[in-house]
Image: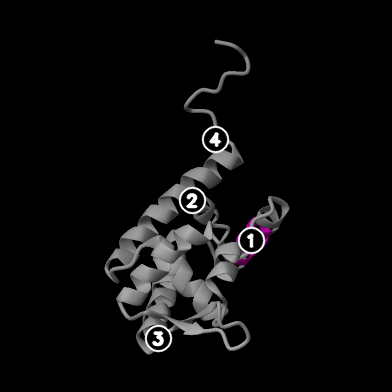
Amino acid sequence: MPASARRLDDPPGSAFLLAALGAHAAARFAERIAALDVTPAQTGLLRAIAATPGQSQQAMAQLLGTPPSRLVGLVDSLADRGLVERRRNPTDRRLHALHLTAEGAALAERIESVGREHDDAILRSLEHSERSRLRSLLARIAEDQGLTPGVHPGYRRM
């Protein structure tokens, strides 16, 4: 076996661990929010609209890094359920501003609660100070890699 070959019992690299934990955490989160009848992509869009209400679909697509044509279907699925509404933009009538409905805002709050529970479950082996340190380190890596804060890079592949 070449000296550079890794064995399965060798400690994995940090990038591998991040990828493995990320995949695990994403799958567990999808399971948790399935009970709310939403997908991870819908969850992220609801979160983005709650954080920046009144943005146009084009601005939201740019924020999420996804083509506007793909965002339309996602917005439609949430609008059909009465969670999101499109309102005419008061400054540019060609654009539609995205807003959560009362039902959408209530669901966004439930999703936030599930997110906190999920975070606690994934990080249960760490003490509070370790969690804070980990979050700080991961945020620094994410910034260095050019990731948009609070936006999952999966939207780029939608």
Q: Is the residue under label 3 in contact with that under label 2 (CB below 8 Å)? A: no
List the residue tagged with mark 1: 148
Q: Nearer the viewer, mark 1 or mark 4?
A: 1
Residue 129 in picture, x, y percent from top left: 61, 67
Say if the magenta span includes residue 64: no
Q: Residues within 10 Å of mark 2 (few under 14, many from 20)?
A: few
Q: Nearer the viewer, mark 3 or mark 1?
A: 3
Report, in whole angstroms, how far the alpha carbon at label 4 lies from the one at label 2.
15 Å
Q: Secondary structure at mark 2?
A: helix
Could you say whether the residue bearing mark 3 is in a helix, strand or loop?
Answer: loop
- Residue that mark 2 sits on: 22
Q: Are marks 4 and 2 in contact (CB under 8 Å)?
A: no
Discs 1, 2 touching: Cβ within 8 Å: no
Disc 4 target residue: 12
- Which residue, given by chain and number where applicable, does mark 3 sit on? 101
Q: Earlier in the sequence, mark 2 or mark 3?
A: 2
